[in-house]
Image (spheres, coloured by chain):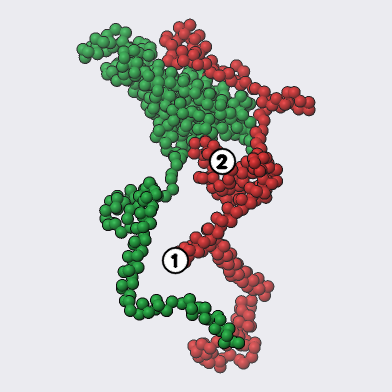
Amino acid sequence: MIIRHLALRQGRRALTSQPIRRWTRFFASQVDTVEASLQTTLGEIRKVEAFVNSRSDHPVSPVDADPSSTPDNDASPEENLSNLGSEITPHYQPHTLLTNPPSPSDITLELLLASGAHLGHNTSLWNPGNAKYIHGIRDGVHILSLETTAAHLRRACKIVTEVARRGGLILFVGTRAGQDRCVVKAAELAGGCHLFDRWTPGSITNGQQILGNCRMKVVDELDREIPDFEEQLLDRSVLKPDLVVCLNPLENYVLLHECGLNNIPTIGIIDTNADPTWVTYPIPANDDSLRCVQVIAGVLGRAGEAGNKMRLEAASQGEVTYQPAQGLKMPAEKKDGEGQASSGSAPVSELGFLQTLM
Amino acid sequence: MGRYDFRPLRVHSAATQLLETQRLRAEPPWYHVVANIPPSQPLVRPILNAAAQSKKGKKPSRMFQPMPIKYPEDQLRREFFSDHPWELARPRVVLEDDGKDGKRWEWSRIEQEGRALDGESVVQRQLYLMKRGGPEGQPMSKEAAYDKARKEFYAHRHQDEVERRVAREEALHVGAYFGKSALEIGMELEDKSYEDWKVWATKEAMAVQIQSQGGSLTTVDDEDAALDSEDPETVAALDEVEKSVPNNKKGQDAKGGAALHP
C-alpha cells in the first residue's frame, strides 16, 4: 500500500520532468548557452522597442546603441542633474528689505500683515488716543487695523514725495538698535539726512550753537554744487529740516517737540502705547518689529526717491519746482556760461549738509 | 494749553499766521503739501462696542473700548491642545513669507505642501470637515470631524515615526554613530552628582564622628589597623621599637610632660 502511494505521488513528478533537456545540456558548452540567451533577450527587447515606438510619440533609443552618441552623455553633469531635487519656491529674504525696499505701490495688507505691523502692545499699556486705529483685542494685545495703517502710510508717502519734489530737506530718524541700516537706506533714496544714534537736544531750537560749524553748500536745480558762496553762507542761519520722519517717537520726544516749536511737520510710527499728537502724520504700526520698521522706512525712502526723480526730470526740462533760497546773490562772474544764465533771479536752491545729523 | 500739545497738527495754520505777519519771508517747501494733504483728525474715539450702546445690562462706558477678536477655530484649538499638550512643545515656524500663506492651503486633505504637519493642521482640517466633510459635501458634526481629523493626524505621525526609526536603523547598519542619547547624558550627570554626594557625605559623617568623640584624633581600631600592616618596613620598625613598648593595651606611661610642666 505504501509503495502504491509512493508511485502515485512521485510518478507525476517523474513524468513532468524533462529528461531531454538534460541530454542537450550534456552536449552544449556553457559559453554557447549564454551567448544564445543574450541574443534571444536582445531580440525580445528590440521587439518591445519596436512596439513602443509604433504606439508612443516619444521613441525610445535602442538598448544596444553606442552609448557615446546619446545626447544625455554630451551634457555636463550639472545639466543632467539640475532638474532633480526639490523646488525652492520664492520665500522671504530679510536683506531684500534693505537692498531693494518696497515702493509705495507695493503696500498691501498682506505685506503689512506678514511684517507684523498689526501687533500692538498689551491692552493695559494703550493710549486711548489710538482707539481709532485699533481693530480689536487678541490674547491681551491690541491689534491695529491694517486698513488704517495702509491708508496712513500711503498718505505719508505722498507727503514725502511732494516735499522731495519741492526740494525740501527730509530727515529720517530711527535711534533704536538695528534701525540704522534702514534709516540710512531711506535717507539715501530720498536724498535726505539720517540720524541713528542720538538726537542732540537743541539741534533745531539752538542750532546756531550746535550745528554752527557744519558745512553748507549751494546747488543748482540739477543738484550740482555751485562754488564761491562761502562768504555769503558764513552769517546764514543753520539749516532746519523741512520734514522729519521718526521711526521711534517714544524715544525722540525732544526732537518732535522741537519740530512742533519750529513748525516742522513730522511723520512717525505710532504704536498703541504712543501719543498720536506728538507727530503731524501718524502711521499706526508696530514700532517694535524690525521687519515692519524696515518696510515703512523703505516705502518712505522710495517715495522720496520718486519725488526727487520728478524734481530732476522737471529741472532737466528747464522747470524748477521750488522757490529759490532767499538772500543769495550769484558770486562775481568767473565762468561765462553759468554767470549769464543765472545773473538775475536764478533758481539757486539751498540744500544743506547737516554734518552732525549724518 | 491743555493736556495735549496740538502744535504738530497745526503746522499749516501756524505757518499761515507767520507768513501773514511777515515773520516767515518765504513759504516753506511743505506749505502747499500739508494744505493739500491735511493730517487726519486725531484722538477720535469711534464706537467700537455697539452692543454696549443698545443692550441692557451693558455699561455705556464700555462703548469706546476695543472688542476681543474671536474666530471659530479658537474653541477647536483650545480643545485639541488641551488633549495634546505636548504638541505645543514641538518646534514650529511662525515666520510668514508674504502674508498669503493661508491662501495656498486647501484642507480637503490634512497634509499640505510646504507646511509641516502640526496641531494647527488638525484644527483647520476639522473646521473644513465641519463645513463640508460629510457625504456629498454635507456639514459634519464637530465631534465626528474632530475624530476624523485627529485619526488622520495620528496616522501621519505614526508613519513619520516609523520612517524615522527605519532611517536610523539603516544609518546605524551602514556605520553611522549618533553619540549618546539625551537620556544617557542625563543619567550620567545624575550618577556623577550622586557619586559627588557620596564623597561629600562620607566626609561629613567622618567630621561629625570626630566631633562627637570629643576631638580625639585616632581611634583604637585605626591603631590596630596600622599595626596589622604587612609592609616589611613597618614590620621592621615595629620590631625595632617593640622592646621599649610595654605589651599591654594602655601602652607606655608618659614620662615627664605634665609632671615636668605642672
Q: Which percent across, then down, holds residue A305?
A: 39, 24
Q: Nearer the viewer, residue A209 or A163?
A: A163
Q: Callout 2, which amino acid?
A: Glu
For the point 64% across and 91% down, which residue is it?
B248
On-image quarter of the C terminus of chain B: bottom right
The label nearer to you, 1 versus 2, is 2
The image shows residue A78 at horizontal and vertical percentages of: 33, 49
**Residue at the image position 38 percent from the left and 57 percent from the top:** A48
The hue of chain B in the figure is red
Q: Colour of chain A?
A: green
Query: Mark 1 — on which chain does it sit?
Result: B
Q: Report the front residue among B221 and A214.
A: A214
Looking at the picture, does residue B215 appear above or below residue B88? Answer: below
Q: Residue at x 58, y 28 (%)?
A: A145
Q: Residues within 10 Å of mark 1 (few under 14, many from 20)?
A: few
Label 2 crowd bin: few (<14), some (14–19), many (20+), radius 10 Å: some
Quadrant where the image shows the N terminus of chain B: top right
Which amino acid type corresponds to the residue marked 1 in the rendered image? Gly
- Residue B27: x %, y % from top left: 43, 11
Disc 1 on helix, strand or loop?
Answer: loop
Q: In this rendering, do the residues under marks 1 and 2 share a single chain?
A: yes
Q: Toward which corner of the image does residue B46 lie, by quadrant?
A: top right
* C-alpha span from label 1 to label 2: 42 Å
Q: Where residue B181 appears, x then y in whole percent?
A: 53, 62
Q: Residue at x 52, y 36 (%)?
A: B100
Q: Which mark is residue B106?
A: 2
Q: Under tag 2, what secondary structure? A: loop
Determine the chain carrying the residue at label 2: B
**Is residue B127 found left or right of B170 in the rendered image?**
right
Which comes before the other along the chain, label 1 or label 2? 2
Question: In this figure, which residue is indicated by the disc labeled 1?
Answer: B175
Asked which quadrant contains residue B162, the reply is bottom right
